[in-house]
Amino acid sequence: MGTGGDSSTITLSRLKDLIAELEEEIAQGDGSDEYRQCVYEKYKWERVVQGYVYRRIDHDILSGTAAGTVFAWGAYRVPMEALVDDPNATSLGEFWLDGRDATLFQLGNLPLISPARPLPQGEYRFYYNYRLPKYTICDAYPDRLRTANELVVAVSAPAGTLHEAFFDPVDAADGSVGADGDSGVLKPDTFDMEGGTKTTIRRIAWSKRQVVMALSPVTDL
C-alpha cells in the first residue's frame, strides 16, 4: 500500500470487500476454471485499454449500392490475434456493429462490412466492436471500447440522380413507395393520398433546373 504522496492507498477492509465482490462475480459463472480466467482477463483488459486512442475510419460509397456489396474489412483490431493467442482456436472471436446507423450495415465473414440495403445520399456513423474468444465466456468487454472505433460512411449520389430528393430506398417486398431494396432503382408504384385517392408515380425527370414528377391521376401534392 502507499505511504503518502501520490501513491494509491486502500484499507484492509476495502481490500477484503473487493476480493469478496470478485469471488461473487466468479460464483455467478459456471464454476469452471475457464470462467475464472475470463474474469481475470476482463479486468486486465479494462486496465490495458484505459489509454486506447479513439479511432475514426472513413469510407466512401455510392448511393443505391446494392445490399451485401462489401466496402470495408471490419477487423481493424486484427482477428488473427485470436490464433496467436491460441493456435488451436476454432473461432476468431465475436464481431458486432453498434451505434446510430448500425442497423443499416451488416457483417459478413472475416468480417466484411457492407450495406444492409441501398442507402440514399448522406453521412452514416456506427461503431465496430471485436473481442477474442477468451473474453466471450464471461461476456467481458470494456465500456471504453464500445465507442472507440467509429466508422463514418459518406454516401454520395452519382450525377443525374433524381429520386433521392423524394425517396428513401425501401425493401421491395414492403410495398411502400421508394427504391427497390436490392438495386436501389426507383420503382413506379401506387400509393394512397389523403382521402383515399390512389396515385401512381409515372415519371421523374429533370427539366429547367427543376425536378418534375408525373403522377396519375394528376394530383396536387
Image (spheres, rainbow, N blue to C red):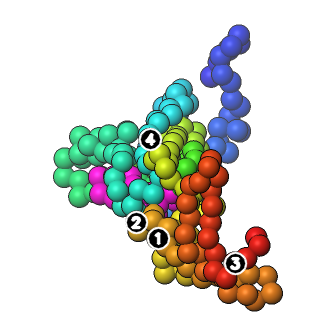
Label ID, residue 46: none
Secondary structure beneath dot 1 equals: loop
Tell me the kind of residue under disc 2: Ser
Marks 3 & 4, CB-CB < 8 Å contact: no
Label ID, residue 180: 1
What's the residue at 64%, 43% (across, down)? 18
Q: Which residue is mark 3?
A: 218
Instruction: Say above or below: 159 vs 7.
Output: below
Picture quarter containing residue 108? bottom left
At which x and y percent is residue 166?
63, 61
Q: Nearer the viewer, mark 4 or mark 2?
A: 2
Q: CA distance from mark 3 to mark 2?
A: 28 Å
Q: CA distance from mark 4 to mark 2?
A: 18 Å
Q: Which residue is mark 4?
A: 60
Marks 1 & 2, CB-CB < 8 Å contact: yes
Closest to the observer, 173 or 193: 193
What's the residue at 57%, 45% (across, down)? 123
Q: CA distance from mark 4 to mark 1?
A: 21 Å
On-image quarter of the N terminus: top right
Q: Which residues are magenta?
A: 103-119
Q: Which residue is mark 2?
A: 183
- Does the segment drawn in magenta span residue 115? yes
Mark found first going from the N terminus, 4 or 2: 4
Q: Nearer the viewer, mark 3 or mark 2?
A: 3
Picture quarter containing residue 137? bottom left
Mark found first going from the N terminus, 3 or 1: 1
Which residue is at the far left? Answer: 88
Secondary structure beneath dot 4 equals: strand
